[in-house]
Amino acid sequence: MEQKLLKIGEMAELNHISTQTLRLYDKIKLLEPRYLDSETGYRYYTLDQCAKLDLIHALKSCRLSLERIREIFELSSEELLLQALEEQTSRLNDEIYSLSASRNNLNRIQKNLQVLRSLPPFGQVFFEYIPERKIDMQRTEFDFFAQGYKGYENMLRHMQNYLHENHLPPSYFVNVGTMMERENFVEGTYRAQTAFIFVDDLYPLTENIRVLPQGMYLSIVSDDTSLETAYARKLHEEMKHDSMIPCGDYICEVLTQFPFKDSGQLIYRIQVPVRQEKPIVP
């Protein structure tokens, strides 16, 4: 059966692409017209070349480069095609993971900004229910209560180095917090040498992952790090007044830091999980 010859415009229209795209494929020898009319100089495609064009577009949709596609065609190797698809699948999986983690952290930043709008005035103690959360944490040589904001920044760099050295996703470094052990809070020997980041189920499993259980928390918000010691004492006094006891560690979560000015505005929320002290049964 005689092959139907297609001009470049007809080939383009039939396959819903532009003539410029076909000219590019011709130029890089990825898909060249099959016939040349020696009298007119016109070049023609054939209908059966559409199958090759379909495969080119399928591989492009998998984000293989035109160079890689041409290499596969030149070698006419199913094995090379399979290898290229496996490699591309691995690359796309890595990219999907990275994009998913970034999306989740964008959602966390947006949520934190929304939380800011609903919080009570700075320095006011309040109760709140907080769902279960997961953190990755690092013990450092620095202590916020001994070194203040400088200590906090050093703890941040320690956490950042930990992520870098262990090839962990840097996108989780969005709101680093500090932690004080329950015993230090109860005894008033304030020390916070642990830094943490909030993570989710996409985050790689490390030996430092810890789950913060859901529950009621006694909280206070501030934008002045120099007041954290006073506010920690204020929380402690409020618990004693309401006959409550801490049932977990003291968490200081940085909700946001706006670096629009040289100093930046850091807004943090202190949270301590609490429960009602059991009455003594006579």
Image (spheres, grey):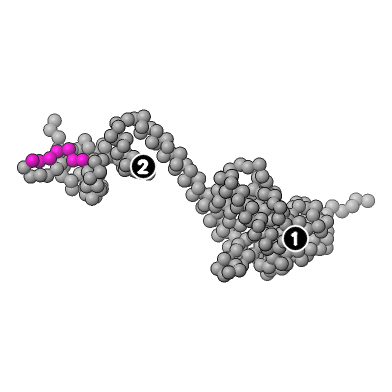
**Quadrant of the rendered structure where residue 2 is?**
top left
Residue 180 shown left or right of residue 263 in the figure? right
The residue depicted at 8 percent of the width and 40 percent of the height is 38
Task: Report the number of numbered marks.
Answer: 2
Residue range highlighted in magenta? 32-38
Q: Amino acid at mark 1?
A: Ala
Where is residue 224 shown, x and y percent of the image? 68, 68
Quadrant, the N terminus: top left
The nearer-to-camera label among 2 and 1 is: 1
Q: Position of residue 149 (x, y in %)?
A: 68, 63
Any magenta on residue 33?
yes
Q: Residue at x 25, y 43 (%)?
A: 28
* Secondary structure state at the residue bearing disc 2: loop
**Residue 213, x across and y down, in percent:** 69, 49
Looking at the rendered structure, the kind of residue marked 2 is Leu
- State whether residue 158 is above or below residue 4: below
Comparing 70 with 120, the one in front is 70
The residue indicated by pointer 1 is 146
